[in-house]
Image (tube, rainbow, N blue to C red):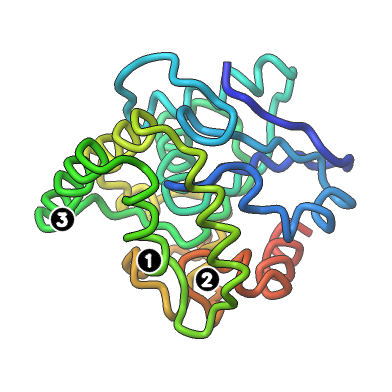
Amino acid sequence: MLHYELKGSGDETLVIIHGFLGDRTIFNNVIEELQQHYELVLIDLPGHGKSKMEQRNYTIYDYAQAIVDVLTQEKIANAAWLGHSMGGYIALAALERNMAKIDKLILAYSSASPDSAETQKKRDGQIKAIEQNGVKAFVDNSIDAFFSKEAANEHIEFARNIAYKATKEGLIAALQAMKERPNQTQLLHETSTPILVIEGQQDTIVSPIETDNIAVQKIVTNTGHIGMLEDDKAFLKAIKQFLG
């Protein structure tokens, strides 16, 4: 079972899923406010935070099922899901296969598109770098790209220290799962599930989501890839307006 925390109370449950190099605490700047309005389920993915690896390899669907197992354990029948980056890929996988009753979905600095051939090759290089040099060296070489040029150093260091907690095996499994994830753009175009896309104007990690689906709303924050740290107020405002 994944490590998770339950916080807050409210009529609506919000499942919060971090991304690659994160854990549940990457949302700390927004949790105090959110828990006043919603029941929160804060997840640590395998090999990140306090969650152990229960198998060597994972698909995006395996991660989704592990989260569904948590909701089953807590007897949570339906919820809104918020996925940051890789967490968004996982949430889309759960939506695609109807693995849980997802009332609303927030894709924060995420994408519905699969990896390009170039990105897949880059992930292979990242896996090799982690295997050869370890987690700390990989994080130190990667973390700055997740932020805008104007980001506060304290936010970068906060994210860096969270990333240090990930295991080598957890990061490699996540990279492989992202590399092999399916194309969910058709799902995004056709779904009737209300979706909020939060996009970073200075995000260089993922490509913007484009769709004419009226079920999908979009807001843009003037941030990089981890906008809940760089501009927590804009992030919170978007979530609260969307969830109601």
Q: Name which residue type carries label 2.
A: Lys
Q: Kindly indicate whether the residue at mark 2 contacts the one at mark 3 (C-beta within 8 angstroms).
A: no
Q: Residue at x 30, y 22 (%)?
A: 57
Q: Kindly indicate whether the residue at mark 2 contacts the one at mark 1 (C-beta within 8 angstroms).
A: yes
Q: Residue at x 38, y 53 (%)?
A: 139
Above or below: residue 97 compared with residue 191: above
Residue 88 image point, x, y percent: 46, 48
Q: Residues within 10 Å of mark 1 (few under 14, many from 20)?
A: some
Residues 238 and 202: in front is 202
Q: Quick one: label 1 or label 2, which is nearer the N terminus?
A: 1
Q: Is residue 54 left or right of residue 44?
A: left
Q: Residues within 10 Å of mark 2 (few under 14, many from 20)?
A: some
Q: Residue at x 51, y 50 (%)?
A: 192
Label 2 sits on residue: 218
Q: Name which residue type carries label 3.
A: Ser
Q: Name which residue type carries label 1.
A: Ile
Q: Residue at x 66, y 43 (%)?
A: 80
Label 3 sits on residue: 116
Q: Is residue 58 left or right of residue 5?
A: left
Helix, strand or loop at label 3? It is loop
Residue 20 image point, x, y percent: 42, 46
Residue 10 image point, x, y percent: 88, 42
Residues 13 and 7: in front is 7
Q: Is residue 240 left or right of residue 11?
A: left
**Which quarter shows the C terminus?**
bottom right
Helix, strand or loop at label 1? It is loop
Quadrant of residue 67 within the rendered picture: top right
Residue 200 image point, x, y percent: 48, 74
Q: Is residue 209 left or right of residue 116?
A: right
Q: CA distance from mark 3 to mark 2?
A: 23 Å
